[in-house]
Amino acid sequence: MTARFTFLGTCCALAALAIVLRLHQLQVTEGERWQDRAEDSRGGATVLPGERGSITTADGVVLAQDHAAVDVSVVPSAFREQGLLHALADALVLTGALGAQATPDRSTALRWECHTDPRGALLRLAQMPARALAVGASAGACMDVLLAPHGSLPRRRDEGAARLSEALRVLQGSGLRAPLASLSTNSGSIAEAAGWDVEGMAARCLEELRQLTALARAGGGDLPALLQQLDALALREEAWKQRQVRNELRDAAALDHFGMVEPSIAEMGAGSWRALVLDAQASFGDEEAAARALSHASAWLSGSIPVPALIAAVDGTDDALQTAAAFGLASQEPERVLDGWYAKSPSAGEATPLRTRRERELRALWRRGRPFVLQRAMPAALAVLVTGPGRLGRIGFSVSPRLVRQPLPVAREFRGLGLLLGGVAAETSEPTLARSVEAALNERLRATDGESAAGALPGGVVVVAPHHGTGVRLTLDWKVQRAVEDALGATEAAEPGAVVLLDIATGGVIAMVSTPLPRDLNAALDERRRLEHERTLLRRVLGRGEGWARQRLLSLSEGPESAAAATERVLLQSACDSSAAQMRSRLDMLGERLAVSAAYHRAVDSPEHLPPGSVFKAVTVLAALEEGVCSATHAFDCQRIETRDFLRCKGHGLMNAHDALKFSCNAWCYDAGARLGTARLINWYRKLGLFDPVPGLMEHDERLARELRTDDARALAIGGGSLRVAPVRAAAMAASIATGKVVRPRLVADSATPPHGAVLAAEAHLATVRAGMRAVVQPGGTAGAVAGLRHLRMAAKTGTADYEASSGERLQQAWFVGWAPAGPGETPRIAFAAMRAHTHDKGVDAAPMAAQALEAYGVARPERKWW
Amino acid sequence: MSGGVRWFSKLRGMDAFVLLFSMALVLCGLWFLDSAGRGSDTLLTTQLRWLALSLAVVLPAMLIPWNRLLSLAPALYAFGLVLLLVVKTAGPVINGSQRWLPLLGRGLQPSEFMKVFTLLLLARLMRQQRSLQKFVDWLPLIGVGLLPTTLIIIQPDLGTSLLFLPLIVAVLIVGGAPWKKLLLAGVLGAGILAAGAGLLLEDYQKERIWSTLHIDKMTASQRSGPGFQLEQSLIAVGNGGWTGHGHGEGPRVQAGHLPYHQNDFIFALIAEEQGFTGTALFVLLEVLFVLAICRVGALQREPPAQVLCAGAAALLGTQALVHMAVTVALAPTKGLPLPLVSAGGSSMMVSLLLVALVQNVSMHRGRWQSLGGLSAH
């Protein structure tokens, strides 16, 4: 039996041996071939953009949608080395156009001239005598000019000649007919010597200029700004490359000479140091080159210790210091690490053939560079500028497709709606505004990008398919929304307020308007963030003391520099320089500005505490009847109550439940609240869905429920205490009373939760409350005197919530909440909530807003009009 | 003796070599998956979760004596067949085949588990049928092997179905079938397979075979289509050189050029990052692992125990060798995970189940003979 198992094991071992042999063939014998293929096909993965779900209104108007766009990237070194205009400037510099006083500034001026008048610059170059080409071959001084911010990166000792040759090749569009040395012997001009078609070259230069200008304009800027941006990217690219290459070369050099990657000075030893000097001298054949290379090598080896210090440390002789000083190395830093290293060969011509894979990779790193994103989310039509022969793609530009969320004309035109929808960041595709439709429905709308690996076909091979977000249809009626905005005269100057219209049958919000409208949505949101940030900081400084502020300042100054950190530093410094009274005063001012800010959609969000006031007496009365703490006929004399003045009760006399609503009697509800208790009232709020999420708008608010637990039931009973309600919830409360079932408001048409929940209360009790609310708009009721309400046949409740504003002033929030039609036997259709914030008005003053909104509804949807 | 002590005493009977090499493979797998995650630890944590779950499942398979397990074999085999039928009729179509059953939010591959159930039934058959001298004696074994093979082929999942072939061959070899008859059957079987391949293989499968044989002659559309994986795999392997690019540094894999680098092509990741030296050592580890299983089998006296070990060695060894052969273009492209190494819950669980069966055999022997055993008695 052992033999049979041995047979099985042998088969396995032989098969494994075949695999190892094959591995050897692939990785060792044919290794270079596969490595070259890996190098050649380093295209990288391409992003396949996923489309974020669109948002439409109930009547099919698209409010937000993804649009095709492109990100434009560039490899700065490719742009500098392959660009016609850069090549033209290089050629002019290297043929001595700047003369003996070549400076980086003059080089920059010349380059700018090439980018503005390429034709003139080209003619100037073409007419130069051909012997000027010999200058480039020995123009060591020109190297410094090339190294200026606009210049190219050197890679070889003979960079001058190599770069001039490359520049002429780029300009000519094909290889030079003869080497520079032979061209320079020609007695004619450069154009004659090289056989240039000057007009053709000028046309290509002008075309490149046109394309670059078009690219700059597409990004909303101009050519100088684009060139500056490219310069900034080039500096980043250079820093990145130098960091990479310096590390690699330092390790390689250290391994070569010392057999370890990071030798200390002691480990290097004086003997090794001298050997390195001799080695360098032998390689370069001249002392200056050896010393320069040595300075780089020593810096790689030692980190960034200056050469003299290193020499002194290992040698300890004055000669070494003098030698270093003689070569001007006392303060030299190894900025151009490749200079000398790859040209270690004594031959002045071509660079040394690269021996190892690591060296090849480093070369590739320099050759290809890394693309930087130049401009994000540009119009898709821009791709034409970049792709195709003769386009910007040949000089290092590339485009990658993406989808961006752009506000549609409807959302731009109706800025209040834009506030409700919110935005999506172009970089992260995440919502930018917390309380917005984009944020509330993010999970559903969100898309994830796919990935395509580079393949032989243009599209590559899809590795990960993109996931597209699901579109959302809102319950908003576009026509009604517009009509209500128009009817209310919603402008930038309007007072803070909101109106919500809700379809009772579906629970869907038909229209929700907030005032004032933002003049510029993004600017308003930026200001809101800034003010809120400052308010938070000031509150912290006041709460935690100046010590905390000083400590925070210190940590900010030590941390990474960013715009946010700079802003916070300024704010903290200002806070530290102010007294507590000044800070409080500033806080009041901030609160005041936020209170009237246009950057809040007040139907769902508010800068201030929003108590519903007497509007919630309807809930108190219903709860009192349903819980049995009083009957519908229970009579209560509000004139007898001692705290009548405190409660601002007008002394209505004997009141029952109906009259308590009609006259909005504080004392009656105060008494009912005392009998009900806080817990029972909170249960009723929970039953009404006050803490539940509103799909597409608001999240679950358990925090409010916790805060209410410590409140006095009597305050809650009159809509005070910690109670706060957004208009959309207030409208839902009215809808619930109208139908007798809990109505769950929503902004998403296909929400999973049914619109109507459990039965709210006994029909008799509901009838009492409804009758009381109908009486509110009848003569004698709190809104009975308002013209234009009765023909709408509504039932409603006024509310005036008194509060102290940031400025210390006593202000009010006026509410008018109800439903219509509310006539006998009529089925309620629309619930509404109108609210005016930060005002001296009373609840009754909000009633006209509701009437205007309902009238507008009738105009927009005449088929659904009931009056 | 309390239950815990008795269990511990049983565990001491495990074969040390199998334990050592399987643990080494699992740890290697986790290390490579850390790299395959390309900066994200999702792959690694998911695999660790599966590993924990698998260990919880395989522990009973190790502790219940194997002869008791064999009595459950017919029921398990029937259950496996039903699952295969269910997956064919009601399973979701993913990438053009029906292989997975959605379970607890994840995909379970019944064909993987069928390998274990078939092995158990084959071992049970060998308990009853002591002789394999005649061709007719082989029929029950071949029948038991071919039935699930057919059901898996029609999913279609050619890779997994082909693993049943070496399983049957290994059972026949250790079952004592005469060498001459095995050779004759091998020649006949190869002929039938070749003829069947010509008739039954789909066009894309033929094109994959062609690509494997003519790597340098592939057209652009073939390089982007059926030969894409193969070419990317070879570039990644070749790019590894002698010493590789280091853990998490493989440029091809890390740049996302090689799809399925975490499961069907993890060997390419190993080759690119560890180079020839590291990869050859890894192959050696795989061979030692299979040899250790064979060694446990060779120490057994009862035919079912031998069949269990030979079957486990055949399944694990063939799967590993085919995976590696595919990666280096010695076999046509076929998606098979590397046992104990690749990402994937079903594969990990089944591989550990097979290892557990081998340990079960080692633990429940009549007497101790293994030099490598942990037990002293």
Image (cartoon, coloured by chain):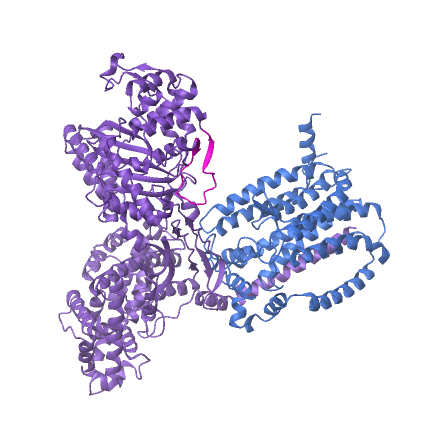
Specify the quadrant of the image occupied by residue A772: top left
Residue at position x 32%, y 20% in the image: A669
In the rendered image, residue B302, in percent from the top left (x then y), is placed at 80, 44
Specify the quadrant of the image occupied by residue B264: bottom right
In the rendered image, residue A508, in percent from the top left (x then y), is placed at 40, 41
Residue A856 within the segment the image draws in magenta: no
In the rendered image, residue A535, in percent from the top left (x then y), is placed at 23, 35
Residue A286 visible in image: no
Any idea which chain is the purple one in this picture? A
Q: Nearer the viewer, residue B333 or A238?
A: B333
Residue A678 visible in image: yes
Q: Main secondary structure of the magenta part?
A: loop
In the rendered image, residue A101, in percent from the top left (x then y), is placed at 13, 70
- From the image, state the color of chain B: blue
Q: Nearer the viewer, residue A400 or A100?
A: A400
**Left of A818 or right of it: where is A533?**
left
Q: Nearer the viewer, residue B299 or A552?
A: A552
Q: Please give the range of residues in magenta.
A: A740-759
Specify the quadrant of the image occupied by residue A805: top left
Count the marks: 0
**Left of A558 or right of it: where is A765?**
right
Residue at position x 25%, y 79% in the image: A203
**Quarter of the figure that contains the C terminus of chain A:** top left
Q: Residue furthest left?
A: A101
Residue A741 within the segment the image draws in magenta: yes
**Left of A287 or right of it: where is B119?**
right
